[in-house]
Amino acid sequence: MRVSIITGGGSGIGAAVARRLAGPGQSLMLHGQGAEATGLARLNSVAEECRSKGAKVEIATGDLAAAGAGIALVEAARAAFGPIDTIVHAAGFADRREFASLPREALERAFAVMAAAFHEIATAALSDLKRSARGRVVAVSSFGPHRFVPGATYPGSAAAKAALEVLVKSLAIELASSGATANAVMPGYTRKDPGLFGALDSSTWERVAKANPMQRLADAAETAAVGAFPL
């Protein structure tokens, strides 16, 4: 039985990874913020879909920006299934506010959810991940730290994703001697679940899709396939 923690598991790339991993021999702890009834319903729906494929699934909710939330998530997964084999950190959000209009609390929240929570979760599970060569960590970053154009610099969320990538590289070095691995996936603009738009409105989604050389957005399942490759 392989035990996996997936943050951002209620929608988008996190949900797509959960669906891809789901099957007999898989135990999944799916985390979502769960602050709204619709978000909690989506998380439960993904969990049920994964259970229908033969996986054992539990869900956890809460704000990963809060100190200790990542530790609690690891403890809950261990209590439900045993030692952790896999972490997929897909929790995140885009913040389009430009440099001068980005308040400090927004910058701090971006770092807390995307970078600090990852560090806390991975640190809490480190002994599990190192116990054999089967430990796997994948973090979902974005094009934000690598592509800067006027009107789409995303200074808050892109900076947090850049920090996330540095943490992944550092963790990969620390895990290397055990045979466990840590990788980051950096997708471009990715189609949201039906009814969700993220930081962009529908017309802007259409515009960025046309700007892509393939004239379309990425699909969450495509990114999940890349992210699941090392798992």
Image (cartoon, rainbow, N blue to C red):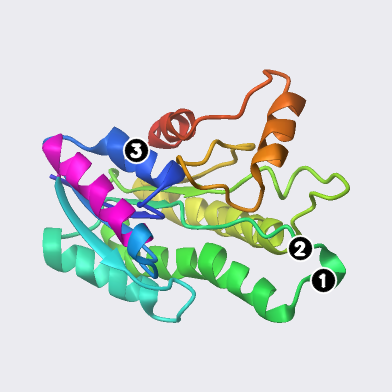
Is 99 situated left or right of 185 in this image? right
Q: CA distance from mark 1 to mark 3?
A: 39 Å
Against 218, residue 192 (above or below) is: below
Mark 1, Cα crowd under 10 Å, few <14 / some 14-19 / many 20+, is few
Residue 51 lies in magenta, yes or no?
A: yes
Q: Amino acid at mark 2?
A: Arg
Circle 2 is placed at which residue position? 97
Numbered label tally: 3
The quarter of the displayed image where residue 29 is located: bottom left
Residue drawn at the location 31% of the way across and 42% of the way down:
18
Q: Is residue 120 above or below residue 129?
A: below
Instruction: Decide if residue 53 is on the left or right side of residue 18.
Output: left
Q: Which residues are magenta?
A: 39-55
Badge 2 vs badge 1, beta-carbon distance below 8 Å = yes
Q: Which residue is mark 1?
A: 101
Query: Looking at this view, is 115 or 224 the one in front?
Result: 224
Q: Which residue is mark 3?
A: 231
Inspect the image, locate mark 3, and give the three-letter code of the amino acid beneath it.
Leu
- Residue at point 45% right, 44% down? 12
Tell which of 10 and 224 is nearer to you.
Answer: 10
Label 3 environment density (alpha carbons within 10 Å; few <14, some 14–19, many ≥20): some
For marks 1 and 3, the one nearer the N-term is: 1
